[in-house]
Structure formats: C-alpha cells, structure tokens
Image (cartoon, helix red, strand yellow):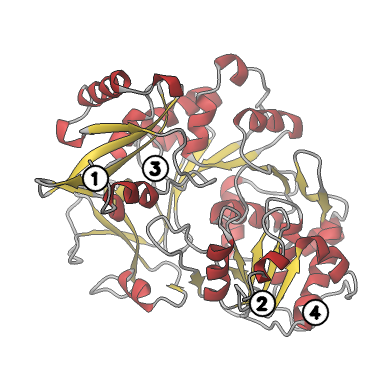
Amino acid sequence: MHPRKFATSHPDSIAALMGNGSGALSYQTLERRANQGAHYFRSLGLRNRHSIAIWVTNRTEFFEIYWAGQRSGLYIVPISTQLNAEDAAYIVNDSEARLLICDPAVRSAQDMKRGGKELIAATAILDLSDWQATISKFPDTPIPDEMAGIQMVYSSGTTGRPKGVRITVPDGPADAPTVRAEGLSQKYGFDEHSVLLCPAPLYHTAPLIFSTLPQRKGSKIVIMPHFDAEKMLQWIESYRVTFVQMVPTMFIRLLKLPREVRERYDLSSLQTVLHAAAPCPVEVKRAMLEWLGPIIHEYYAGSEGNGTTSIGPEEWLGKPGSVGKADLGIIHICDEAGVELPIGESGLIYFEGGNEFAYFNDEEKTRNARHPIHGNWTTMGDIGRVDEDGYLYLTDRKSFMIISGGVNIYPQESENLLIQHPDVADVAVIGVPNSEMGEEVKAVVQPMCWEDRGEDLAAKLMNFCRAHLSHYKCPKSIDFDRQLPRHETGKLYKKELRDRYWSTDHEL
C-alpha cells in the first residue's frame, strides 16, 4: 500500500505528530503537500533517479519531503544533523544531489554559500522555513510521470568518509505495494490502528524505514525530537504507543533509570519492541524481557539491504545472544581469503542472494564488499558465527578487531561485560599502540559519577573483567571520558577514540 490510500479512506487520521505538541500532519495534508512538492521538484528539472539531499531535524516536514521525493522517482539522501557544513557539503556533492533542503535549526541556506565560495554544487538550496510557501504555488494533484523513488542513506563514517548505499530498485508506480512493507506489516502487525514511537533521528536508516513503511499501512508516527529515556516512557503511556524501534544503548539508559521512575508509567499498550543497529549484551536483553515481557524482537540488517535475520523473544531465550536466522539471503561465514568456515567458527558474514547494492561513486568499496569467488555474496564487514541450527551470532566489526601479539581480540565481549557494572554509564574498548605486542586492549569509560574516576575505579573495573573473561581479552588500562563520542542512534565513533591514541604525538 501507500499513504495515498489513507488520504482518501482516512483523510483526518494522523500520519505523523511531534510528541511535544509542536506539529501534526494528517494523511490528507501529507498527500496534498507531497504532490505539491513533487511538482516543485519537477519545476527545478529534477527527473527520475536524480537525487535530493535533506538536512532536516526530526519534524513532520521530513515526511512531506520524503514522500514528495518518493513519488518523483528520486533518490532521497538524508544528512545527519550532527555534521558540520563541510561534512554535509561532502555528502551533497558526492551524492550529486540537485537540491538541498536545509533546516535553519541546523544550518541556513545562506550559511552554505558564505565565505566567498560555494560549499556545494547543488542546483538549488531551499530553507525548510520556505518549504510550505514555496510548494503552495503548485498543484496538489499527482505529477503525470510518477515513479517510485527510494532513500540513499550514507554510512555514519565510523571508520572513514561516509559512502552512499544505492539500492537497485525496479522502475514502477509510486503507489505500488512493496514486498518489504507488506512483509514487515504482517510480521509486526502494522495497520491503521498502530501507533509507532520514533525515538531516533529520521536521517538514520532504521528510524526512517520504521516510520515510512508503517505509513504505507496507515499507522500514526509519534516523533521524539531527540531521545530522552523517561520522556519515552511518558509518551508511550500518553499516546498509547503499540510499537517502538530502539537500539541497545537506549535499553541501557532505560534500565539505568531509578526503578521508581520505570514503574511510574503504564506501558501496557506496547505490543512490540524491535531492536537492532548494534549487538545487545545478553544480560541487558534479559533485563528488558523481565521488565516488558516477551514482546522484544531483534533483527540484523544494514542500509545495504543485502540480507537480514530476525529472532523473536521466546526464540531468543533458547538462543541467547543470537540475532536469529536468515529472512533474506543465505548466510556464509568465510575467512579473509573467502574460504567458507566450519559451523561455530567466527569469520566475515556474507549473504547470498539478497538485494543488489553499490556504494555510490566508490567502485573499490563496492568491489571489496563482494566475495572474492562468489560475486553474488556480499558483506557489510561484520564478524560472526553460525550454530548448528543456522542461528547467527555477531562477534564484532572487522574494523574494530584488535591484534595483540598475533592474537585476534574482539572488543565487543569486554564492552558487553563492562556496561553491566553499576559504576559505568558507557564504555568503548579499543586497541592502542604497544611497542612489543603491536596493540594492547584499552577501555575508555564514561563513569556514572564523574567524581569517581581515577585509579581506584580503574582497578575495580579491571578486576571485574578478569573475574569474568580470559585475561588476554581484558583491558590493560582504563581511561575516563565525560562523554563518549556516540551517534544519536547509539553507534559509537571508535575511529575518533582510536585517533587520540594512534596520533604521532600521543604518549602512552
């Protein structure tokens, strides 16, 4: 289905609203403005398979622009609102966007032109504050040459310059049903009675997908401007939310709320909590299941769309730590040379037979994502293993692996342990230079109370690790940080941390 259907059948139903009361959008209004936006795009010379970039905070206009681009056959490039002007300009230029829409809350259009030179090569720049006045001049009926477009999301750049993931989509009607939307709606029960809470930035893949796909089924989307643990609980109660998509960092922050706060709110409307984006520590997920009951589902996927897995709550209790069995594609675990490994051994995760994709303007990265022998097997660079029943377990990112004295160490295991310590608010484990071993394991900890930092806490945490893990996996040293560099979606910028220790002027 498509939101257009509900503009006719349920015109006054809410497609999206800001949980703080700052805006609401009915399906009828969404249809009208999306059509006007599509005419505006055509007036700029934008045609099917051209690109537009949107640098917009969480607000209802995001959906007006998205659905206008979707019915115009465009690639829609959302830009992180955490980026500075230069980094945003890189994405605009790299994606070959012909229009940039700027939210003044992030950066005005004029700011992108200051300094005596153009930061971007886009055909046009529009301030979001001028969006409605601009499109109001155009017809509110569909453009005659509609075609289905899709998002082109850029990676968050945790290990280098971000790259756009361009998924191959067939040419087809804008309002045609999609297999993905139909499948997810059946799996998780989206319909016109569903209320979904979006606590994460819409420019990120999962929040965008789990907002726009339910809108194809007439659901109501409640938008949080930014994540706040207690406010999430409050809004679930107030709006009788039925579904929320989260990341493990959000779980951890919810669980670290005082018990009396967590028990203050009625969460009985919740039918499904879905999580992904990063491996979830087993004990964290157990605690969430004990709190919310068997409604927590998990999936593993990426912006590339080359394969997915999923696992339900009861299933997970029998396979704790697993991200499930394949829903899309066939899983293969391979070594660096591409040789398939035996069951139970960790290696690069490849999917066979998933969606076709390419990293835009980066043939080398696209080629490196392909299996060296089987060209239709692709990887996102994650390390994992598969058990005898076909369940996948994530080990870590290949790029985060620490090699100390020739031994491969995956930091995720010690991170999952340390985050459970009551004195730890957040943690990252990285490899730092060691003249003898090449690398050694270091933990960078954000303490619950900054005043507790120091040698005593470091010793306590290292002893905690050694009591539960093999010593070679444990940190050899611990540093403290007031705030770890973490993306709003929960993804940790490990490159930024590593650069502190691998710079030539850093002293160990």
Secondary element under disc 2, as helix, strand or loop, is loop
Disc 4 from disc 1: Cα separation? 56 Å
Q: Quadrant of residue 215?
A: bottom right
- The residue to which callout 3 is attached is 279
Pinpoint residue 337: horizontal percent, then vertical percent.
17, 66
Pinpoint residue 109: horizontal percent, then vertical percent.
72, 66
Q: Earlier in the sequence, mark 2 or mark 4?
A: 2
Secondary element under disc 1, as helix, strand or loop, is strand
Mark 3: amino acid: Pro
Q: Earlier in the sequence, mark 1 or mark 3?
A: 3
Q: Is residue 224 left or right of residue 411?
A: right
- The residue to which callout 2 is attached is 73
Mark in front: 1 vs 3: 1
Q: Quadrant of residue 130?
A: bottom right
Secondary element under disc 3, as helix, strand or loop, is loop
- The residue to which callout 1 is attached is 432
Q: Earlier in the sequence, mark 3 or mark 2?
A: 2
Q: Earlier in the sequence, mark 4 or mark 1?
A: 4
Q: Earlier in the sequence, mark 3 or mark 4?
A: 4
Query: Is there any visible trace of residue 484 in the rendered image?
Result: yes
Question: Which residue is found at the position 60% from the left and 72% from the top?
Answer: 119
Q: Is residue 40 left or right of residue 160?
A: right
Q: Is residue 260 left or right of residue 378?
A: right
Residue 143 tag number: 4
Front residue of this view, candidates 507 and 126 = 507
Front residue of this view, candidates 424 and 338 = 424
Mark 2: amino acid: Gly
